[in-house]
Amino acid sequence: MSYKTIPAQFLYIGAAGEHHVMSECFRNCYEAFKLPIDKGFDLVVTRAYVHFDAGIDSHLPADEAPIYLQVKSRQVRLTVPDNPAERPYWEGCFYIKPAELDLLIRTSNSALACVLFFHNQSEYMQSRTAIAWWMPSEQLAELRSDHFLESKDSENLELWVRYRDLAIASTSRQNEYVGLRKQSGSMNAKPGELANGKLIAQECFDFGKLSAKAR
């Protein structure tokens, strides 16, 4: 798909997602740079900060290699139940080209970053406009077969996710979470029929722990 066929608002949301991830990286003392040519990666992330005071003879540890990020963004509106004790939620998918996913899997020091921008916010999210997380190359390889589904309408793959917010009036302890959806393994399941998959690990919402290793 060329830039001429992509709706303009999608390009702006894409740019917003990249800048949101860059901001999270800088906030956690990483350096994040937009790559001038998009051939499957949007950002490169480094951590020169840890070497600023180490002297010119210091060597870059193997786990401090640059990390290449592909960023996917969606702007969504949560479904808010009439009952304030029930949790607002959103379920939908991120699109990724098979070649982009395969590049992420082949590149061991890479990760996929996903960003959800919220149109509407609950009482607990008055000052929050987005949530973002990252999935390292190793994890993407594990998810490739049953979490990335072929799209019926395009050549892209679909990564389905379910986001659960906090219920406004609940008295029980809650955590917001993002769960991945996958192809159902039921004997009578049809292609595209979804079931619950992996939950995104809590540390993967923290860009201060950004890594290319599986969580």
Image: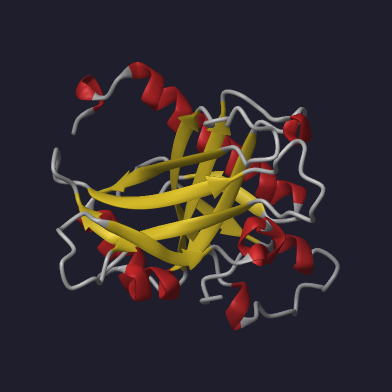
Position above or below: 141 against 163: below
Residue 40 visible? The answer is no
Give whichever of 8, 123 is nearer the camera. Answer: 123
Q: Is residue 94 left or right of residue 202?
A: left
User: Residue at image x 43%, y 46%?
Assistant: 42
Using the rendered view, name the quadrant where residue 81 is placed: top right
Give whichever of 38, 208 is nearer the camera. Answer: 208
Position above or below: 174 against 198: above
Q: Is residue 107 left or right of residue 131?
A: left
Q: From this viewpoint, which residue is outermost toward the top?
A: 8
Q: Position of residue 212 (x, y in %)?
A: 52, 71
User: Residue at image x 50%, y 58%?
Assistant: 179
Colour mode of the rendering: secondary structure
Q: From this viewpoint, which residue is outermost toward the front?
A: 83
Residue 104 visible? The answer is yes
User: Residue at image x 47%, y 49%?
Assistant: 162
Q: Is residue 43 left or right of residue 145?
A: right
Count of numbered circles in the view: 0
Quarter of the image containing the C terminus? Answer: bottom right
Q: Position of residue 176 (x, y in %)?
A: 66, 51
Q: Position of residue 151 (x, y in %)?
A: 18, 47
Q: Is residue 41 left or right of residue 164?
A: left
Quarter of the image containing the N terminus? Answer: top left
Give whichever of 25, 157 is nearer the camera. Answer: 157
